[in-house]
Amino acid sequence: MTMKSLIISSILVLGLTAKFAQAEDYVFFDDSPTSTAYDPSWCFVNSPSLLERIGEKFPVDETTVFMGNNSLRLHWTSQAGGNWGAAVAEIGWPGHDLGTQDLLTFWMYSEGVLTNNDLPNIYLEDTGNQKTSPVNMGAFVDSIPMGQWQLVSMPLDTFYAVAGNANMSSIKTIFYGQSTSDASEHTLFLDEIRMTSFGNSDTTAPAVPANLAAVGYDLHVDLSWTPVDDEDVAGYRIYRSNWGGTYSLVGFAQPDIPFFNHFLGETNLSGFYKVSAIDGSYNESELSLSVEVSTQSQDDEAFLDMIQRATFRYFWDYAHPVSKMALERTPGNSETVTSGGTGFGIMAIVVGAERGFVSRSDAASRLLELFQFLETADRFHGAWSHWMDGSTGEVIPFSQYDDGGDLVETAFLIQGILAARNYFDGADPVEQALVSLATTLWEGVEWDWYRRTPTSNFLYWHWSPNHDWAMNFALQGPNETGIVYLLAVASPTHGVPGELWENGFASSPAYDNGNSYYGINLDVGWPYGGPLFFAHYSYLGFDPRGIQDSHTNYFFNNRNHTLINRAWCIDNPGGYVGYGENCWGLTASDDPFGYLAHEPTMDRDNGTITPTAALSSFPYTPVESMAALRHFYTDHGDRIFGPFGFYDAFNETQDWYSSSYLAIDQGPIIVMIENYRSNLIWNQFMANPEIAPALESMGFFPDTTVGIQPDDDRLLSAQDFRLLSTYPNPFNGRVGIHFQTPQASNVNLIIYDLLGHELYHHSQPQEAGSGRIYWDATNDGGGDVASGMYLFRLFSGSESKTGKLLLIR
């Protein structure tokens, strides 16, 4: 979720005035990984008292927050004869020895005025479920003024005095409970619930964040800054002023995410922003220098730039600091990196280099460092594990028997490595080293080992040195694993016969479908097609256009699979809130109940829409995917668009909006949008010399069906001569002019200076459809032109289009 507006007129600190550091604290709550309820909690209520609960969990609030992304909402009415209690624990429910700490501290906020008599009791519970007697908060806090955060500090000696049978060396939960039976409704927001010691005082504020930058988009402002290098930084506070006067707090960013999206919901809205850093002792830095920015309307091309740039950050700015691999998810374990998600991230970095999000040299250096880590990481007959430790490269078991090689994740990783190997083809020593190491990694995978026997028709997903073939998972479609067979057949060192595609992967009785759903034919796939990641993971690098096997043309099959998925959401047999022609997309993701491979069946559709499903389908359904993108952003952006693009999923029926990102969901978004825009990753992967012969040996042949072919940019045919975009503009070095023409012709580009002098002329043949023509900021003599504004005219037959280009050297 984007950070909500936090309007805090002042912070009133009562009780002890010392501030306490974070490093050795027992943290019972600082942020909930989910946006609805805090999992390590338990709540009860006895009538006639009332207590708001989510199931039996503590409700989470995202609108009133002291620090982080959310707080806990304590909403109660205490009646005579009733009772209630709300317990909060640290994630994992550990027991804590209170002998090392001195204080229970937390921040609270009330929307109305409360007296000390209105405040709840607090008591502690140990791992054996023995409780202390209750202690009333009112003894330590005066009344709470409305609309102010207040620090509460309670000496732990108070609880020792009423410990009873509770084991104070093993306390697992803090209970808030009924006190005065005043029959009145009350709400408190609680944040940063900790146990700390007197010795953890710190009064030194962090350094001021530097290099604050802002970009205005349709409905939100994107902020970024240079992270503060202080070890105890706990996060950043973001402030806004509409007119450059008083600044109000509007949000918070985590310490490892120096980005913030402020979703304003309006176009052409201006404002000023500043940022501060705050440490674990709540010391706040001075405010940064201000930046001014306005939201502004965007065309479709700029919109796609915005989505790709934000999603790119997950793989560049949020990569593991040692390995540079992709973290499996956020929030999550900061050491768990994922092999398959890293493969997607490698392709994302290629896109970032091509789009100018980072320089080509920086991208090459980053990937060389990543490949060097992969070279030393644990491998199992050449295959990497699903998860590994991002600092050491050691396997992290994915399940009881899955503690070895994962051939599917390895294939997703190699798909990215091969795309990068072809892209970075320069004479630069770093690029040459990258290419050499990419080849070594690729040729080191023993695909044939995972065949188990020389006569097997199947490849197998897992092998473990501890459990051998205990997982016993033969790879058989229809599913996401087709790329494994393509790479195994293509391998120059450990190849398998091409016949395994037909006799293994495509051999299931369920492979061929041949039915029609909502009037849409499906040659291959489960009924209604299955989750949409089946149409994405194996096709990030593998370009399915213009070829087919004996079963189908997989581009058209994937398109129809996508349209069926959308049609199911429009039909909406489950009656879920929000579903419609622009709100669609069922695939694997987080949901309100955990994690599920959502698909168009009654038992696997629970109302959860996953943005990657529609957005990663851009090559197949560009019109429908663009409409979904606009809907997700315009109608739900304040809840589902964050610093790394769209959050994982949302469920309007359950009023649930994810706060997580998953590498395997973010990666396909940026890559498949780029394949739609320029064919970049398709072109780079398919250009590897091992791929075409492998496809031929697998039984693929050219498809002469009228329709999209490998050199087409767009699915829909051009109806007239149109100028689609200029990118980048302003530019430094080279600019691409994107157009479409309804018929084959020579396209001519003429560049003029502002006095009308012709500087450059270029002509190229163009088939009907869309194309690009480039100018490298030189004149007809090959000399560089100076920085400044230039005019261009683009001709196709008797028609022409004009535009402006801004060169900044």
Image (tube, grey):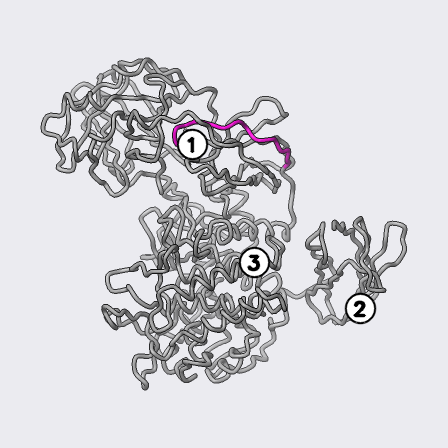
The question of residue 281 being in magenta is answered with yes
Q: Quadrant of the N terminus?
A: top left
Q: Earlier in the sequence, mark 2 or mark 3?
A: 3
Q: Residues within 10 Å of mark 3 (few under 14, many from 20)?
A: many
706 left or right of 368 in image: right
SS for callout 3: helix
Disc 2 target residue? 763
Q: Nearer the viewer, residue 151 or 511?
A: 151
Residue 721 visible, this angle:
yes
At 71% from the left and 51% from the top, the residue drawn is 729
Residue in view at x 31 percent, y 26 percent: 199
* In the image, residue 164 above or below residue 358: above
Give the residue number, with chain letter if any, for mark 3.
Answer: 363
Q: Nearer the viewer, residue 2 or 171?
A: 171
In the visual, does 613 lie left or right of 407? right
* Residue 704 disc label: none
The x, y position of residue 154, in whole percent, is: 26, 21
Say above or below: 461 vs 596.
below
- Which residue type carries mark 1? Asp
Query: Which residue range is magenta in the image?
Result: 280-294
Callout 3, which amino acid? Ala
423 versus 597 height, above or below: below
Mark 1 highlights which residue?
A: 279
Picture coordinates of residue 504, whole percent (x, y): 36, 80
Q: Where is 217 relative to 494, above or below?
A: above
